[in-house]
Amino acid sequence: MGHQLCNVSIRGLMPFEPVSILAGPLKFDVAGYTEGLPTLVYNPYSWTKVCSIIFLDSPVGTGFSYSSVEESYETGDTKAARQVHTFLRKWLIDHLEFLSNPLYIGGDSYSGIVVPVVAQEIAKGAQDGDELLYNLKGYLVGNPVTDEKFDNGAFVPYAHGMGLISDELYESTKKSCGGEYASPTNEQCASHLQSINKSSGYLLSYFWANNDTVREVLNIHKGTVQQWQRCNYGLPYAHDIPSSLKFHLNLTSRGHRALVYSGDHDMIVPFVGTQAWIRSLNFSIVDDWRPWSAYGQVAGFTRTYSNNLTFATVKGAGHTAPEYRPKECLVMLQRWLSGAPL
């Protein structure tokens, strides 16, 4: 089969989220919504146009996934990565026709921690003589959580640079926090950070996913998941991988391709923090900072590094990029998968 095979694993989310609002074949008819059950319409910019995608609930306990063994809900970064690898291995054994396809592991947001670990688990298995011969080509992460120091450290400077907070609030926050925003060390710093923080809702997804008719169509077993949540923060989850930097370094050094992309209007994981951790890898620049275009318009900026790592911003996109700029992100993916410059 000619399609690439991408495995998308998103911590705390279920497949419905990427299917409906990110990169899948369906999306909400937001403009036509009034009340009741939201309507789904086809997404003309679905990533399934250029690759075969597995959307996976990960870890166990998120979305509609469940286990009959209570201990399975006690999970974390490392365990979640192993669960994804185990699932993918079993799935490919059951679908051997996909085994020779180029395989890319991908995900957005918190998957920036888990995706590189999954890719490394697969790469390590091949190195150790795993009889299942994956055709792993690389991985891609969007608006990725990667390292607390870089991610959280960029939050306040980004908000100020985008004109989202006043000079006065920026200066007072900088002073009270000592320029370190990842872990507030005093009450004044925490208060200032709270003033800067913002939240957003995904109400249509709750209405849709908790509808009995929808659940029946999705074959969700009654009694397994009481209330669907976009992000399940109630799981006993161990954040045991504080940084995925070493996994990026290991994978790209072994020749695996990497695409790191960020919406340039994302204040949850600001792109300036992502740029900073990429610079910390000390890769040489192959193709320096330049605009990339889609449909005759500038769609963002990109830089290509040695070790097959490409970074791209998506102009005007938030968290995460495909939700806000689906046309442009499809072009980006198609070019990257084909090996063409963005």
Image (spheres, helix red, strand yellow):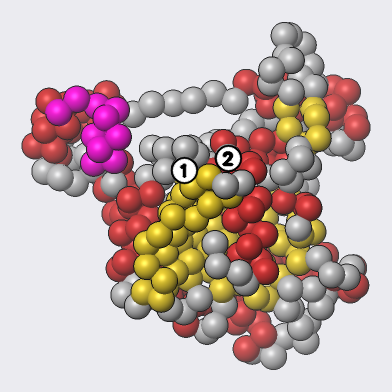
Give the Cα distance between marks 1 and 2. Answer: 8 Å
Is disc 1 surrounded by few (<14), some (14 to 19) or many (20+) residues within 10 Å?
Answer: many
- Residue under pointer 1: 315
Query: For the point 57% across and 36% down, which residue is it?
Result: 324
Q: Amino acid at mark 1?
A: Lys
- On the rendered image, what quadrant is the C terminus found in? bottom right
**Could you say which is closer to the camera, residue 325 or residue 72?**
325
10 Å crowding of disc 2: few (<14), some (14-19), many (20+)? some
58 vs 305, nearest the viewer: 305
**Which residue corresponds to the image point at 74% horizontal and 78% vertical from the top-left?**
134
Rendered location of residue 189, percent (x, y):
17, 33
Q: Secondary structure at mark 1?
A: loop
Q: Which residues are magenta?
A: 157-167
In the rendered image, residue 59, in percent from the top left (x then y), is placed at 64, 51
Quadrant housing residue 230: top right
User: Where residue 149 appears, x then y in whole percent?
Assistant: 29, 54
Q: Is residue 292 left or right of residue 27?
A: left
Amino acid, disc 2: Arg
Residue 325: which numbered mark, if any? 2
Q: Tell me the tag on residue 3.
A: none
Q: Which residue in the rendered view is the most extreme toward the left?
A: 175
Of the numbered discs 1 and 2, the one sitting upstream in the chain is 1
Residue 166 magenta-highlighted: yes
Q: State the SS at label 2.
A: loop
Do the residues bearing badges 1 and 2 touch, measured as CB atoms within 8 Å? yes
Can you give x and y, in whole percent of width and height, for residue 56 in the image?
72, 51
> Who's the residue at 19% across and 25% down the image?
166
**Where 7 falls versus 40 (above or below)?**
below
Residue located farthest toward the front when viewing the structure as drawn: 296
For the N terminus, the image quarter is bottom right
Image-based side of 50 in relation to 309, left or right: right
